[in-house]
Image (cartoon, rainbow, N blue to C red):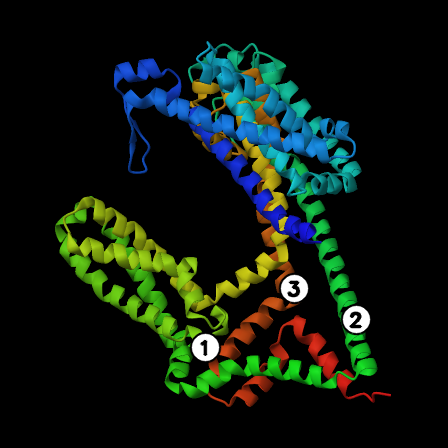
């Protein structure tokens, strides 16, 4: 029993450790792809230091040391992956199934493909540049093995299976329109040597049907990096512009619709489970009351809960001035209007302060910002002093101060006064002006968005994690293919730049289009599938917001917030609790049923 208890406590820590090692391995692998480490001898000879942009510089003379250190860290991570894989095989009742599962395949590929080359690099053996890059990028595929902890791909495949037939129909319509338009473009442009675009003739761009499919799909998605088409092609493009983008978005729309139905089904199942659990709890409580006569226990539990509910009201009765201040800071319309206006004005002044032409009036801008900063300081101090009686901050001053919004404001205060100590320091000025933008979070006090965000997060936490993991894994793994296929020719000199460009591609914006055949295939994959996968997390957020608005939960939350900040401090605690009884959360319904059961006879 002791061992079982320890194993349950260690398991989450072990999972977190595996995720942390995977993240470390991916980060060090991305660092190893920097051009700074391609040829350390040439880098040291040229004495070209690498500025990280984070306040420190990598010295060219120590390039080999840095490279060996990164390889050693990657080797330790690979050895950890090997130990984990062997332990899983040892504990699995049928170890051969580990080699057939997608996560096991990812482990085998990463370990067998990257570990020997990494050992060769550390041992000083000759390894070609392509082999080294292949081994480095292969380590990023370890992300697929994290599916053990986030069962995302299974849920994704289940959603696809539920809409498989409809998805095939949509893909058929898209493919038919795409192929017909690509054939038209290729037929009229593969021999067009007179008209050029980007210093190449259209005969070069549309030299074969594969590239014709690539450029046609890019145009169908609504992006036109090339516009110098002849008239006979422009006529067809003009006609297809009004409908082509709709065909491209059909797969993404189908995925979004499928996940919407899946989320709705999950909400219904969760509601049924809550109702079943509620009935079981009520029956259990009634059995306790009927059989064991624990009426006193129930009375004490309800009394304790009532005391917790009235603690806020008692605190506001004890400190009426702070209660008035709490109401004033959160509910007074005039004050909130002044706070919003001051915030907009302060952000505008901080933005104007960064214009070089206005540098002679620097003192005037600092003078204009100073009273606004003092106003924000007083607002912060007032909210902090009343946080212990504000349920929005869990009646805790520490919770208020340690929230990320408050930390941003404290940072802005500190950097501004740090700038005033040396007004002529350009670096301090940049930091202070950049930090002043964080005062935009003042509108959270005006609009009360924290409760809404908490509701949305509670509603879609699991679904959002699953969708983000699927889209993020697709992004990183496809970026490794882009890096190996294109390389420096398209500005993808390292994994960081490759992730940057592929992130732009996933938005449907093609800032570059002169790809290799493999890159052309990846661009078509991005246009059909990638854009939809990238939009899924935000689609889940939008779906949750729509569901809350339709169900009335958001309006209930707004009304409850208004009552908390306006009536509790003006009435007695009993009267305030009675007013708030209609706005209590769903989880307290069980207490009402327990009270009803107490009124029933016990025989």
State the residue position of label 2. Answer: 279
State the residue position of label 3. Answer: 550
Residue 89, visible in the rendered structure? yes
Name of the residue lying farthest toward the front: 2
Q: Residue at x 53, y 19 (%)?
A: 134
Element type at mark 2: helix
Position of residue 460 measured from the top left corner of the image (x, y, whole percent) = 62, 54
The N terminus is located in which quarter? bottom right
* Disc 1 + disc 3, Cβ < 8 Å: no
Sequence-wise, which precedes: disc 2 or disc 1? 2
Separation of residues labelled 1 and 3 (CA atoms): 31 Å
Separation of residues labelled 3 and 2 (CA atoms): 26 Å
Q: Residues within 10 Å of mark 2 (few under 14, many from 20)?
A: some
Q: Nearer the viewer, mark 1 or mark 3?
A: 1
Query: Does residue 370 lie above or below 562 as drawn?
Result: above
Q: Residue at x 22, y 66 (%)?
A: 371
* Disc 3 + disc 2, Cβ < 8 Å: no
Query: Does residue 443 lie above or below 7 as drawn?
Result: below
Of 577 and 566, which appears nearest the observer?
577
Q: Residue at x 77, y 76 (%)?
A: 285
State the residue position of label 1. Answer: 389
Of 426 and 256, which appears nearest the observer?
426
Position of residue 474 measured from the top left corner of the image (x, y, whole percent) = 59, 33
Sequence-wise, which precedes: disc 1 or disc 3? 1
Element type at mark 1: helix
When asked about the image quadrant of residue 265, the answer is: bottom right
Separation of residues labelled 2 and 1 (CA atoms): 34 Å
């Amino acid at each position: 029993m002791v061992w079982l208890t320890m194993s349950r406590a260690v398991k989450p820590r072990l999972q977190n450790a595996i995720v942390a090692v995977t993240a470390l391995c991916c980060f060090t692998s991305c660092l190893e792809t920097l051009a700074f480490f391609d040829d350390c001898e040439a880098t040291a000879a040229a004495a070209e230091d690498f500025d990280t942009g984070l306040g420190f510089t990598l010295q060219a003379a120590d390039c080999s040391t840095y490279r060996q250190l990164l390889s050693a860290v990657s080797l330790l991570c690979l050895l950890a992956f090997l130990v984990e894989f062997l332990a899983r095989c040892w504990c699995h009742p049928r170890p051969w199934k580990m080699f057939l599962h997608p996560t096991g395949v990812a482990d085998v590929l990463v370990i067998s493909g990257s570990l020997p080359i990494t050992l060769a690099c550390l041992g000083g053996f000759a390894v070609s540049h392509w082999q080294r890059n292949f081994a480095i990028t292969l380590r990023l595929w370890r992300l697929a093995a994290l599916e053990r902890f986030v069962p995302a791909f299974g849920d994704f495949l289940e959603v696809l299976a539920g809409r498989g037939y409809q998805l095939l129909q949509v893909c058929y319509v898209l493919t038919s329109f795409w192929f017909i338009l690509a054939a038209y473009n290729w037929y009229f442009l593969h021999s067009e040597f007179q008209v050029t675009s980007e210093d190449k003739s259209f005969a070069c761009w549309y030299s074969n049907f594969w590239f014709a499919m690539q450029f046609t799909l890019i145009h169908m998605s609504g992006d036109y990096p090339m516009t110098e088409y002849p008239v006979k092609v422009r006529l067809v493009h003009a006609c297809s512009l009004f409908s082509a983008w709709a065909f491209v978005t059909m797969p993404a729309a189908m995925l979004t619709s499928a996940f919407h139905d899946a989320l709705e089904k999950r909400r219904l199942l969760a509601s049924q489970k809550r109702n079943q659990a509620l009935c079981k709890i009520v029956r259990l409580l009634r059995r306790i009351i009927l059989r064991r006569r624990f009426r006193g226990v129930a009375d004490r539990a309800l009394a304790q809960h009532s005391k917790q509910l009235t603690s806020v009201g008692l605190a506001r009765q004890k400190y009426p001035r702070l209660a008035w201040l709490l109401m004033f800071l959160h509910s007074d319309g005039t004050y909130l209007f002044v706070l919003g206006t001051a915030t907009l004005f302060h952000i505008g002044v901080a933005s104007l302060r960064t214009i070089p032409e206005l540098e002679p009036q620097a003192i005037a801008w600092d003078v204009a910002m100073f009273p606004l900063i003092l106003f924000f300081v007083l607002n912060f101090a007032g909210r902090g002093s009343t946080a212990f009686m504000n349920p929005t901050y869990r009646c805790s001053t520490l919770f208020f101060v340690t929230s990320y919004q408050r930390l941003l404001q404290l940072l802005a205060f500190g950097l501004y006064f740090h700038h005033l100590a040396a007004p002529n320091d350009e670096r301090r000025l940049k930091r202070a002006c950049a930090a002043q933008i964080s005062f935009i979070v003042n509108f959270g006090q005006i609009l009360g968005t924290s409760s809404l965000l908490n509701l949305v997060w509670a509603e879609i936490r699991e679904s959002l994690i699953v969708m983000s993991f699927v889209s993020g894994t697709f992004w990183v793994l496809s970026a490794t293919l882009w890096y190996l296929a294109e390389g420096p020719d398209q500005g993808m000199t390292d994994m960081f730049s490759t992730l940057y460009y592929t992130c732009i591609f996933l938005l449907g914006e093609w800032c570059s289009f002169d790809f290799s055949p493999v890159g052309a295939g990846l661009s078509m994959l991005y246009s059909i599938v990638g854009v939809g996968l990238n939009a899924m997390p935000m689609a889940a957020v939008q779906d949750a917001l729509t569901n809350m608005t339709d169900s009335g939960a958001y309006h209930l939350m707004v009304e409850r917030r208004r009552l908390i900040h306006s009536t509790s401090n003006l009435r007695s605690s009993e009267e305030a609790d009675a007013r708030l009884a209609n706005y209590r959360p769903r989880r307290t319904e069980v207490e009402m049923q327990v009270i009803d059961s107490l009124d029933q006879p016990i025989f």
